[in-house]
Amino acid sequence: MVHEMIPLAVNGPAAGVLLAVGMVIAALLTGAVWWGIRRRSSEPPPPTPARQPHRPDRQTRAEQTEAL
């Protein structure tokens, strides 16, 4: 059985290009997370349980027809 050596790494200038592309992608992902955190912190907080809407005392028409 013959095993050939297959180069798995990139040599020469292509390695620098791939490294630069990887750094740009990492920077974009980091920026997206930072931007999402800033947007999330500027939103109003979720409502407290006391401010949640309550179910009506009787069933709605949709609930009555689902039960049939």
Image (cartoon, grey):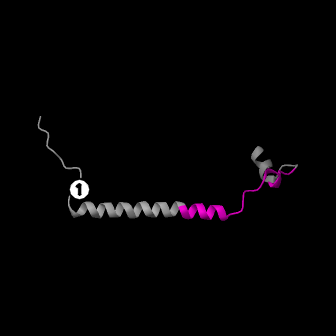
Instruction: Judge left or right: residue 34 versus residue 41.
Output: left
**Circle 1 is placed at which residue position?**
10
Residue 66 seen by the camera: yes
Residue 68 seen by the camera: no
- Which of 33/3 is in front? 33
> Against 17, is 68 above or below?
above
Q: How far across and how far down the image is residue 41, in percent?
A: 65, 61
Neighbour tally class for label 1: few under 14, some 14-19, many 20 plus, Cα within 10 Å: few
Q: How far across and how far down the image is residue 54, in percent?
A: 83, 52
> Against 65, is 41 above or below?
below
Spot the residue most to the right: 57
Asked if the magenta segment contains residue 27, the reply would be no
Secondary structure at badge 1 equals loop
Instruction: Judge left or right: residue 20 versus residue 50.
Output: left
The residue segment tinted magenta is: 34-56
Quarter of the image with the N terminus is: top left
Instruction: Judge left or right: residue 44 versus residue 3.
Output: right
Quarter of the image with the C terminus is: top right
Q: Residue at x 83, y 50 (%)?
A: 55
Q: Amino acid at mark 1?
A: Val
Q: Residue at x 19, y 50 (%)?
A: 7
Spot the residue most to the top: 1
Q: How far across and how far down the image is residue 33, in percent?
A: 53, 60
Q: Quadrant of residue 19?
A: bottom left
Asked if the magenta segment contains residue 36, the reply would be yes
Q: Residue at x 51, y 63 (%)?
A: 32
Q: Quadrant of residue 2?
A: top left
> Against 47, is 42 above or below?
below
Q: Quadrant of residue 36?
A: bottom right
Q: How far across and how far down the image is residue 52, in percent?
A: 79, 54
